[in-house]
Image (cartoon, helix red, strand yellow):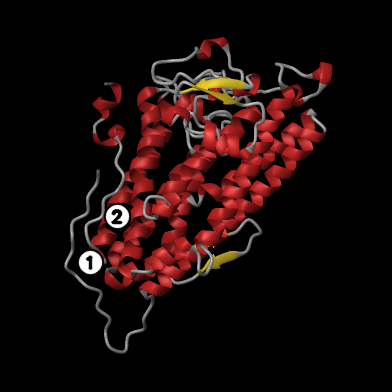
Amino acid sequence: MIRTMTATAALILSTGAPVLAGKAEVLSTYADIAAAGYEDSLIKAQELNAAVDALLADPSAATLAAARTAWLESRVPYQQTEVFRFGNPIVDDWEGKVNAWPLDEGLIDYVDASYGGPSDENELAALNVVANTSFTLSGEQIDASEITPDFLEETLHEADAVESNVATGYHAIEFLLWGQDLNGTEHGAGDRPWTDFASGDDCTNQNCERRGEYLKAATSLLVSDLEWMAAQWIEGGEARSALTADESAGIAAILTGMGSLSYGEQAGERMKLGVLLNDPEEEHDCFSDNTHNSHYYDGMGIRNVYNGEYVRVDGSTVSGESLSSLVAEADEGVDAALRADLNQTMIELAQIKTAAEAGFSYDQMLERGNKAGEDLIMSAVGALVTQTRSIERAVTALGLDQIGFEGSDSLDDPDAVFQ
């Protein structure tokens, strides 16, 4: 875990000099960006929900494609909100409901025979609740005849206290829309047929009605979860109030989120770990082959909160006093270096995104011996680590107390990954 050391320097404003930013104003901008980002995520989830309704009402190749497109679009604003994790407990405690991964997809629906069955780690790994109206959980018989949002949230999600039993959120929906990606490190995403949602004799792979019920329940739950989180960041919301209750702690929370997402989460668990294991299952959006976009918009979210500016899905901009201005008052050199590092990270992530969109998909980059792919990923990992060091220097410049950033064995102790 990276630790920043306590600094004794305080912000000094010269008499008569313009005051570029205050902590209260910076926190207000941050909370405004959070409120807008979660509202945009909600808007896009509602569009996804409508596309799922259209798919289930009239299953076809076109309606399935439209639902997939809506899912992909929903990821753009949501990934930019991940920077609000770590420093804000209300977000981190909630996040597992909407964006948990990786998942044992056999819990949800049919999988290829190569997937395997129950394991010592997860007895429900191949449950296939779509095909089973009852099952045993911790010795108790569970009625799964109705697949509802409450059933998914309260009974199936993380059943048996197993984190990979992901039954809700974006990735459960992604699996239902795309199916398994059986291409390994070759090009290609999941290819679930639209007939998996058809009725009568057109239904493929059985249980089409229940599969549709699951998809509808999961998208409805995603909408309600995002409604709840969006409300936490408006004026008077719990997350905004907690953030602003102590200004110095609030600034520390911003930097904690930036540093933890940069280092342990994105550079480590989401990127370098996949390179070490050469495992496409370590892709964040593994069913849809959308990982390049998830990484890109995670990076953008970090830069958004530092620069105090967010571009909404309707093209409008939310902006205000920035953390950058606050750091610049304390040390212009630290601010300039951090802004440059954030921009360099976006350049590296854009290289991955551009390559993937040109046909060199992220799972291909993870293939053992694929130097071009490894170089692309590791260049971005290096940029993320470098920007984390600059975030540490910003903490010191602001004279904040010691902050702990999330770590990752893949960065801190790579040998432990293989133990």
Q: Which numbered tag is attached to residue 390?
A: 2
Between 122 and 246, the residue placed more toward the observer is 122
Residue drawn at x 56%, y 25% as measured from the top left = 142
Judged from the image, the secondary structure of the residue bearing numbered disc 2 is helix
**Label for residue 254?**
none
Tell me the residue at 35%/64% (across/down). Answer: 250
Question: Which residue is most to the front?
Answer: 140
Residue at the (47%, 30%) spot, across then down: 102
In the rendering, at what x and y percent does residue 351 appear?
49, 40
User: Which residue sits furthest bottom?
Assistant: 16
Check the picture and name the quadrant holding the N terminus: top left
Crowding near the residue tagged with mark 1, few <14, some 14–19, many ≥20 C-alpha atoms within 10 Å: some
Task: Pick the residue in front: 337 or 141.
Answer: 141
Which mark sits nearer the N-terminus, 1 or 2? 2
Q: Position of residue 356 (x, y in %)?
A: 55, 34
Using residue 83 as the reference point, say whether residue 411 is left or right of it: left
| Mark 1 to mark 2 CA distance (whole Å) | 14 Å
Q: Quadrant of residue 289?
A: top right
**Mark 1 against mark 2, which lies toward the viewer?**
1
Kindly check if marks 1 and 2 are in contact, taking CB atoms under 8 A apart as contact: no
Residue 376 position (above or below residue 390): above
**According to the image, label 1 marks what residue?**
399
Q: Residue 48 lies in what quarter of the image?
A: top right
- Amino acid type, callout 1: Gly
Image quarter of the C terminus: top left
Is any part of residue 357 visible from this angle? no
Query: Where 289 falls versus 368 (above or below)?
Result: below
